[in-house]
Amino acid sequence: MAQRNKNQDKKLDEKTAVVTGSTGGIGRAIAEAFAREGARVVVNGRRGDVAEEVAAGIRSSGGEAVAVEGDVSSKESADAIVGAAIAQWGRIDIVVNNAAISGPIAPLGEEDIDGWMDTLRVNVLGAYLVTRAAAPNMKLAGGGKIIDISSGANRGMAGNLVPYRVSKAGLLRMSTALAAQLHPYGIQINTVDVFGATPMVRELATWDDQDPVLAARMRQRLEGKEPTPEDNTPIFVWLASTASDGLYGRNFAWNMNTSDLERLKQRIIADERALRMEMVEFDGIGLSEQGRAYLERLAVSGS
């Protein structure tokens, strides 16, 4: 009985989640955070050995996890990733479409067209295929939560990171379209703009030959003691939990205070504008503890 009461305190107890691209960075942090909250997790990545290492770490901490190797831009792989959750636990309640690549960096006329298309296939089509695979089971279950990872890069203009920016803008629009389509089935799709010292940021910081301005900006971000991948996880736990029920088609920021979001949820639902979409913000939503800590670090460093 004591164990049951303990589990009831966990926000995602008895839920099954798929987190794509969860062998490192924010994806791994989300998978581990979900497991701590009681979710059973499918860990996915292109390298099966690394995915198994992450899954084994979750299991060693008392959680449940399986590893599935696969590239989300392949329909067969997307089906297998979702299928693993259903085969292991009989259902899928949560999907986080995190898998993404930075893509090629080059000015117009010098781009790698194949790399350009690969970026769209992984970052946009991949999320679509995983959502497509998960939707039938979620419909049968009466609902589910899907969270697509976006980025402030979808609104940026500077630099040569064009395919990535386009892919994140496309993902945002795809998410809102599918959110409207799937909401009648109880499936809620939202997006989150993440921010932090991820492996992608660290890689871009070394790309002086491709885009020296972008590389310098990434190094500056890293020196500014950016949020960690773990700092991004509270909003994902909240969106995956019953606390966010009723919200769909919205674009959240990594550093939003979830208590404020919960308090203002009915007002947000009633507003036809998507949260932060087109830079629309709501009064009364403060920063998360992690967001405040980041601003304090910036103030101290003088950035």
Image (cartoon, helix red, strand yellow):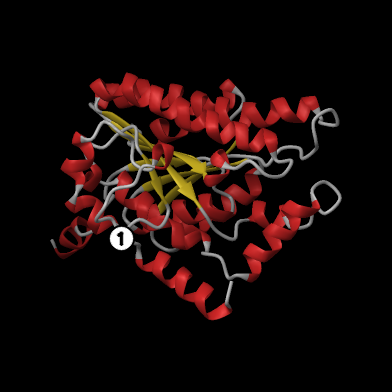
Q: Quadrant of residue 134?
A: top left
Residue furthest bottom in the image? 300
Residue that mark 1 sits on:
286
Query: Who's the residue at 51% across and 59% down the image?
Result: 229
Where disc 1 sits, the SS reads loop
Which residue is nearer to you in this view: 183 or 87? 183
The spot of residue 212 in percent (x, y) is: 80, 53
Which residue is nearer to you in this view: 74 or 226? 226
Q: Work out which quarter of the rendered image holds the C terminus and state it.
A: bottom right
Q: How dense is the environment of label 1, judged by Cα within 10 Å: few (below 14), some, or many (20 and up)?
A: some
Q: Work out which quarter of the rendered image holds the N terminus and state it.
A: bottom left
One can see residue 59 in this view? no
Left/right of residue 225 with respect to residue 139 in the rendered view = right
The spot of residue 97 in percent (x, y) is: 48, 37
The spot of residue 225 in percent (x, y) is: 58, 70
The spot of residue 244 in percent (x, y) is: 24, 44
One can see residue 74 in this view? yes
Query: Who's the residue at 57% across and 55% down the image?
Result: 25
Residue furthest left in the image? 1
Query: Who's the residue at 20% across and 59% down the image?
Result: 9
Image: 71 above or below 300: above
Look at label 1 and name its amino acid.
Gly
